[in-house]
Image (cartoon, grey):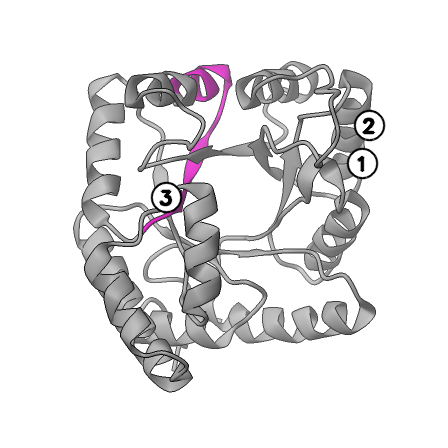
Amino acid sequence: MSPPIFPISIEFFPPQTQEGVVKLKAVRAQLAALSPEFFSVTYGAGGSTQARTFAIVREIADEGFEAASHLSCIGSTRAGIRAILEELQRDGVRRIVALRGDLPSGTADAGEFRYANELVAFIRAETGRAFHIEVAAYPEWHPQARTPQDDLAAFAGKVRAGADRAITQYFFNADAYFHFVEQTRASGITIPIVPGIMPISNFSRLARFSDNCGAEIPRWIRRKFESFGDDTASIRAFGLDIVTALCDRLRAGGAPGLHFYSMNQATLVLEICRRLGVVETAG
């Protein structure tokens, strides 16, 4: 397997069925050609997919890949997080994506952690440097942040608590990323900030999700997609062009890598990386 020319990582979500687990294993086998730094696996709200997340993380590690487990703290206790850290260490997992997370709908108990910086500090206090800790960053600001300054302060708190690196929410405006990085550097933050990349296969679904999470789709891009209606081939082709151009600009501007939100699919990530020439074996 050739070494990566430009670092990438790839995110999955835990499948709900055994059929999905089998399919994801095949997807990983395809994406392995890209020599990713690691595969990460997400969490459901309030840890609702915790068991399935850890099962996939163990499977990835057993296959010989670097595995990163998402770990959200909202609704959790210190004892519960401590037990998870011990389990991950036993399984040979050395990378965590530390997040606040969201409480499940209808749940009021926020648990013993309020924010992600508290989780990062707890991981460091309990395990020292046993884990490489990734945290979230929001180039277009967290949707719950009152001001950009508040959002930057929250990010700085996670870095001070011991984060090694950040992965951003996906975005389609490269200037937002570059501005965010510039602001962090001006405030003394030096950790790598890796852009999160969302390949586009279903625009209507992406638009709904983006509206909910605060990721802006530039008007000209939105209008172009809307003009295609149900023409899935045109949506796919335009999406590939847009995301590849975004990745190209990010790489040229000094981004330290790319983190792909794969949605448990291989085709678009493989094609984008082939166009980018990210690894020798892609294509």
Residue type at mark 2 is Ala
Q: Is tag 3's residue or tag 2's residue first in the polypeptide sequence? A: 2
Identify the residue under disc 1.
Answer: 87
Left or right position of 97 against 281 = right
* Front residue of 90 and 162: 162
Judge by depth and name the residue closer to the eye, 200 or 5. Answer: 200
Specify whether residue 35 is in view: no
Q: Can the viewer see residue 114 in this picture?
A: yes
Q: Which mark is residue 83?
A: 2
**Would residue 204 be found to the left or right of residue 40 on screen?**
left
Q: Secondary structure at mark 3?
A: strand
* Magenta extent: 156-171
Label 1 to label 2, Cα distance in Å?
Answer: 6 Å
Give me the C-alpha separation between circle 3 and circle 2.
29 Å
Proximity of marks 1 and 3: CB atoms separated by less than 8 Å = no
Rendering quarter of residue 6: bottom left
106 is within the stretch colored magenta: no
Q: Residue at x 66, y 17 (%)?
A: 113
What is the distance, in whole Å, between disc 1 and disc 3 at their CAs? 27 Å
Total marks shown come to 3
Which residue is the site of mark 3? 194
Q: Which mark is residue 158?
A: none
Asked whether the residues under the numbered discs 1 and 2 touch, taking CB atoms below 8 Å apart as contact, a structural biologist would say: yes
Amino acid carrying label 3: it is Val
- Picture coordinates of residue 234, whole percent (x, y): 32, 83
Q: Is residue 157 magenta?
A: yes
Quadrant for residue 34, please give it: bottom left
Q: Percent position (x, y) of residue 156? A: 38, 18
Q: Residue at x 29, y 53 (%)?
A: 172
User: How busy is the neighbourhood of tag 1: few (under 14 within 10 Å), some, or many (20 plus)?
Assistant: few
For badge 1, the amino acid type reads: Glu
Which quadrant of the view contains residue 263? bottom right
